[in-house]
Image (cartoon, rainbow, N blue to C red):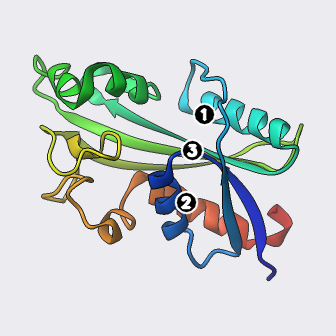
Amino acid sequence: MSTRTLTFVTGNANKLREVQQILSGAPIILTSHKLDLPELQGTTHEIATSKAREASRILNGPALTEDTALSFTSLNGLPGPYIKWFLDSVGHEGLNKMLVGFDDKSATAICTFAYCPGPGKEVVLFEGRTEGRIVSARGPKDFGWDPIFLPDGFAETYAEMAKETKNTISHRYRALEKLKTFLADEKNF
């Protein structure tokens, strides 16, 4: 099987490093390219599909994009794909305050990778989910909402976990495992 190059659209060095670690052993060389893509409103699948199409058009070739969501059960899925803006606006403490009046602190971490093989071609989605709950921020605060997400079955938040542990149970890992399987078949790439 030949090794191929794939452009991952991100300007986030932490995210790139995590994806490269999880995809190690896959038959690809992952490069990155930062693009300011329009942020649409919609479902996680609609947003991911749109971003991949636009990235492929701009790059004039294959593109891989990623979208994360953090869905609070008590808020019927919000903030969902808008977690980045909620976090930027209210911080970790504000996200916790949103759940103060609710007994149910459960949440689902969702990662959707979208691969578009070229301009005008069909987008393929790879989704991973991890169930957990929202807790007061614990651990380093340098990687998004990781400090407030406690995955089910663990005593540590994503931020407190060793990267080697997180990278075998996270929503991103689960989505990338599906992508790895897809990329292993040369006809898909």
Q: How crowded is mark 3: few (under 14 residues within 10 Å), some or many (20 or more)?
A: few
Rendering quarter of residue 50: top right
User: On the picture, is 175 further left or further right than 48?
Assistant: left
* Disc assigned to residue 11: 3
**What's the residue at 77%, 32% (across, down)?**
54
Query: Which residue is tagged 2?
Result: 176
Instruction: Give percent across and percent down for residue 12.
Output: 51, 46
Three-letter residue code for mark 2: Leu
Three-letter residue code for mark 1: His
Q: Distance between the residues labelled 3 and 1?
A: 21 Å
Query: Which residue is tagged 1?
Result: 45
Is residue 82 shown above or below 157? above
User: On the picture, is 158 further left or further right than 26?
Assistant: left
Front residue of 42 and 141 = 141
Three-letter residue code for mark 3: Gly
Instruction: Give percent across and percent down for residue 53.
Output: 77, 36
User: On the picture, is 154 further left or further right than 3?
Assistant: left
Tell me the quarter of the image containing the C terminus.
Answer: bottom right
